[in-house]
Amino acid sequence: MSDTKERVTRIVYHVLDELNEQYAEENQLAKTLETPLLDDAGRLDSVGVVNLIALVEEEIGEEFGVRISVTDDLESEGDNALKTAGSFIDYVCRVVERKVSD
């Protein structure tokens, strides 16, 4: 696993911990790559998605020293970027790597 992916994974899992503080135990999100975020099996509502994105963007800025916007390219990814924690991590890695290389 690349350094960027390890760091982004740590950030996303930390944000999931923060979000889980707001949910009942049976509705909490597991910290696995297969955890569904959206779709029929996903547990995030629209407010949860906004919080996930905002918190990840903030922590990415602190960790990498760059400001990213996860939503800028989200439409080109379709629904796949937010389908699971793993697909979201992969997407954020691509955004970070593009921003860092600019």
Image (spheres, helix red, strand yellow):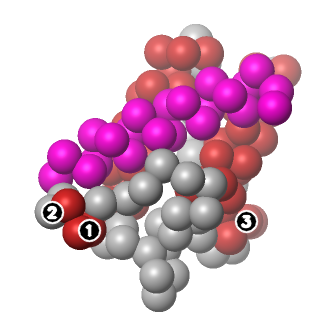
Quarter of the image where the C terminus is located: top right
Q: Pointer 2 and pointer 1: residues touching (CB < 8 Å)?
A: yes
The numbered disc on residue 77 is: 3
Q: Which residues are magenta?
A: 1-22
**Tag 2: residue type?**
Ala
- In the figure, 87 relative to 26: above or below? above
Most foreground residue, 97 or 16: 16
Q: Is residue 20 magenta?
A: yes
Measured as percent of width and height from the top left, residue 36 is found at 52, 69
Q: Pointer 2 and pointer 3: residues touching (CB < 8 Å)?
A: no
27 left or right of 101 in image: left
Mark closer to the chain start, 3 or 1:
1
Q: Which label lies toward us, 3 or 1? A: 1
The local secondary structure at tag 3 comes to helix
Measured as percent of width and height from the top left, residue 82 is found at 57, 64
Residue 54, can we see it? no
**Cα–Cα gap, marks 2 and 1:** 5 Å
The numbered disc on residue 27 is: 1
Residue 73, can we see it? yes
